[in-house]
Image (cartoon, coloured by chain):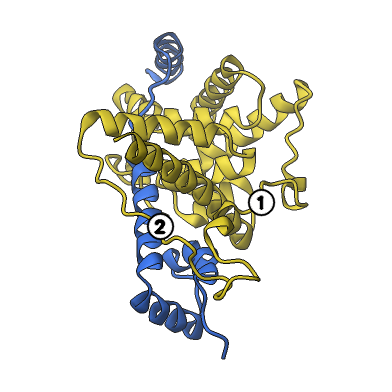
Chain colours: A blue, B yellow
């Protein structure tokens, strides 16, 4: 079997993080990772990127729009 | 379906909205504001227009909550209304985002290939230069810079990629929710997510390299 390359890992990293790989591919990827410092770093960077995306601060709706919607909710929903 | 952290389960949310619980309504507005705005912005031409789409969506939610049947999660239901509203408005604005042609090769080439060895190198497909270790963004200045790099990278993505990465990685939706909200297959969802993540990672890599060189 052809050696599992760094390029293959780069292509499959999202599928790997999503647990979407079949067993043979997962095994080959894990074996490759164990022996490849570059790919371990790449994976760490990829995880860091996903983590940073999830840590973006919330962005509230502009105050006038928010007030208008709350008023609409009150008009409609308050008994 | 997962629930948004900080929000109670759907049956409680729905009962509270039907009973006129304004605090619950405000919590939903605030929790989903960014995701809804960004997603609307993928379909329409201006930020103002996107804000109007979000408002129209919530007005439809206020009108429709009594008829909500719970066939999807509340979040998916609200986002589906948003996507439909935004698409209609986008069409009125003559801004037809090429959602379907996005797979026809119009997307950027894969940017991570340049770090790998080519066909004439000793080990094609293996690293030429291995990726650098990234600093842990502990300092507030660095963290703010990273945030800025990320938002710029997101703004430059093709609309479908931006929609998927926003919902998945920024807003924390599951892949099932994203497929339902955007009406894409699981395989397409994964491809779009992967390409978008690759672009954002690449942007951060460039940024960290600039920082290292100027240090």
Q: Nearer the viewer, mark 2 or mark 1?
A: 2
B49 horizontally vs B35: left or right: right
| Image quadrant containing the N terminus of chain A | bottom right
**Picture residue at 44% right of the left edge, 29% below the top:** B34
Q: Badge 2: how crowded within 10 Å, few (<14), some, or many (20+)?
A: some
B205 horizontally vs A3: left or right: left
**Picture residue at 57% right of the left edge, 56% below the top:** B114
Which residue in the protein does label 2 denote?
A: B131
Q: How many marks?
A: 2
Which percent across, then down, holds residue A22? 51, 80
Compared to residue B113, the image places residue B158 above or below, namely: above
Q: Secondary structure at mark 2?
A: loop
Between B43 and B204, the residue placed more toward the observer is: B204
| Image quadrant containing the C terminus of chain A | top left
Which percent across, then down, holds residue B66? 49, 34
Q: CA distance from mark 2 to mark 1?
A: 19 Å
Which residue in the protein does label 1 denote?
A: B109
Q: Chain of mark 2?
A: B
**Picture residue at 35% right of the left edge, 61% below the top:** A41
Given the current orientation, which residue lies at the most extreme bottom position? A1
Residue B71 can be seen, yes or no = no
Between B171 and A3, the residue placed more toward the observer is: A3
B83 horizontally vs A59: left or right: right
Q: Badge 1: how crowded within 10 Å, few (<14), some, or many (20+)?
A: few
Compared to residue B124, the image places residue B187 above or below, namely: above
Q: Secondary structure at mark 1?
A: loop
Between B128 and B70, the residue placed more toward the observer is: B128
Q: Residue B169 shows which numbered tag?
A: none
Please report whichever mark, 2 or 1, sits nearer to the chain's N-terminal start.
1
Which percent across, then down, holds residue A44? 34, 58
Which percent across, then down, holds residue A32? 42, 78
Compared to residue B178, the image places residue B27 above or below, namely: above
């Amino acid at each position: 079997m052809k050696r599992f390359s760094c390029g293959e890992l780069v292509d499959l990293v999202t599928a790997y993080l999503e647990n979407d790989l079949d067993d043979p591919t997962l095994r080959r990827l894990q074996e490759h990772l164990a022996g490849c410092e570059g790919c371990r770093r790449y994976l760490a960077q990829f995880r860091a990127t996903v983590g940073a995306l999830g840590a973006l601060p919330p962005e509230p709706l502009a105050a006038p729009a928010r007030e208008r919607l709350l008023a609409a909710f009150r008009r409609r929903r308050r008994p | 379906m997962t629930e948004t952290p900080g929000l109670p389960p759907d049956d409680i949310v729905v009962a509270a909205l039907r009973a006129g619980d304004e605090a619950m309504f405000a919590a939903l507005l605030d929790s989903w504001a960014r995701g809804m705005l960004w997603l609307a912005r993928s379909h329409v031409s201006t930020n103002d227009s996107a804000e109007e789409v979000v408002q129209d969506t919530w007005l439809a939610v206020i009108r429709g909550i009594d008829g909500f049947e719970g066939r999807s999660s509340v979040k998916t239901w609200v986002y589906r209304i948003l996507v439909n509203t935004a698409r209609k408005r986008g069409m009125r604005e003559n801004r037809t985002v090429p959602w379907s042609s996005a797979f026809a090769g119009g997307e950027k080439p894969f940017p991570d290939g340049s770090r790998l060895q080519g066909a004439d190198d000793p080990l094609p497909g293996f690293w030429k230069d291995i990726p650098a270790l990234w600093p842990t963004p502990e300092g507030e200045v660095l963290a703010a810079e990273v945030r800025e790099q990320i938002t710029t990278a997101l703004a430059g993505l093709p609309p479908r990629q931006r929609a998927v990465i926003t919902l998945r990685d920024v807003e924390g939706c599951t892949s099932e929710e994203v497929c339902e909200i955007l009406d894409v297959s699981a395989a397409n969802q994964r491809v779009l997510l992967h390409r978008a993540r690759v672009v954002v990672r690449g942007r951060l890599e460039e940024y960290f390299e600039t920082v290292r060189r100027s240090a």
